[in-house]
Image (tube, rainbow, N blue to C red):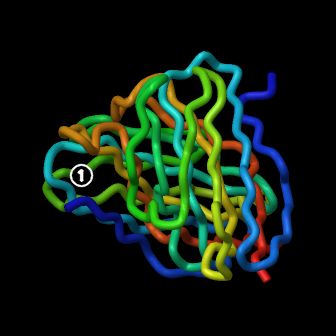
Amino acid sequence: NAGVTQTPKFQVLKTGQSMTLQCAQDMNHNSMYWYRQDPGMGLRLIYYSASEGTTDKGEVPNGYNVSRLNKREFSLRLESAAPSQTSVYFCASSDGPTPQKPQHFGDGTRLSIL
Amino acid sequence: GNSVTQMEGPVTLSEEAFLTINCTYTATGYPSLFWYVQYPGEGLQLLLKATKADDKGSNKGFEATYRKETTSFHLEKGSVQVSDSAVYFCALSDRRGSTLGRLYFGRGTQLTVWP
């Protein structure tokens, strides 16, 4: 009963390095989301994918790219990490891009950029 | 635009005290409203939801009523427990156009309950 699985759980990078955060869901959900959580800011949407084959920018997309690899997987890539991207990243999924469908969250990736 | 404002924390209560966490929203249409809870080191979990005006969401002793006239969705619990210590997020989901299904979160309210 995994739900939404994120890897890695923790990561430390140096400024300028690149990395990909992985997310997979086993609930056959159509929609997937990437958020970042910063102290006192709540969660802010980075990118989302309403359905397989589509991706759209959210509130704070600069410095990130995404890939909806298949229905299960939605990855987030930092091409050239910056200290401002130090944050906790959450992946979520839902049955569809409709307001009544709640989102299910992974446990997060804690990323530090030095 | 869409936004959510919730009361600043932290909130500290004794066990069995009454809890209210205020949440108000601004939305362009008729949103669905949610409360999520985040326990230390974990992701967010849906606590309750309401999809139309006057709906009451409830779960685990928590309740919130969707008040369109006051654009509010306050979270309440009659008797809190130590295990309720967590961060609580109010959120709305838009029903319109390109923002369909996206969640807009408040900043979160840290609740600590002492025995």
Residue positioned most to the top? A28
Q: Is residue A53 left or right of residue A100?
A: right
Residue B97 position within the rendered picture, expressed as x and y whole percent measured from the top left: 19, 38
Image quadrant in which the N terminus of chain A is located: top right
Of B12 and A79, the residue lying toward us: A79
Q: Can residue B75 be seen in this view?
A: no
The residue depicted at 73 percent of the width and 42 percent of the height is A22
Regarding residue A27, the answer to whether it shows in the image is yes
Is residue B53 depicted above or below B91 in this figure? above
* Secondary structure beneath label 1: loop
Residue at the spot 35% in from the left edge and 55% down from the top edge: B73
Q: What's the residue at 62%, 49% (across, down)?
A: A76
Q: How many labels does the image show?
A: 1
Residue A91: percent from left, percent from top:
63, 45
How far across and down, in percent of the image, does residue B74 sit? 39, 59
Residue B108 at what x, y percent from top left? 54, 68
Label 1, residues with CA under 10 Å away: few <14, some 14-19, many ≥20: some
Q: Residue at x 72, y 51 (%)?
A: A20
Residue A92, by quadrant, is top right
Q: In which quarter of the image is residue B14?
A: bottom right
**Quadrant where the image shows the C terminus of chain A:** bottom right
Question: Which amino acid type is marked by label 1?
Answer: Arg
Left/right placement of residue B76 relative to residue B41 reads left
Residue on which the image places disc 1? B67
Q: Mark 1 lies on which chain?
A: B
The reply, left or right, for residue B39 in relation to residue B59 is right
Residue nearest the observer in this picture, B2 or A57: A57
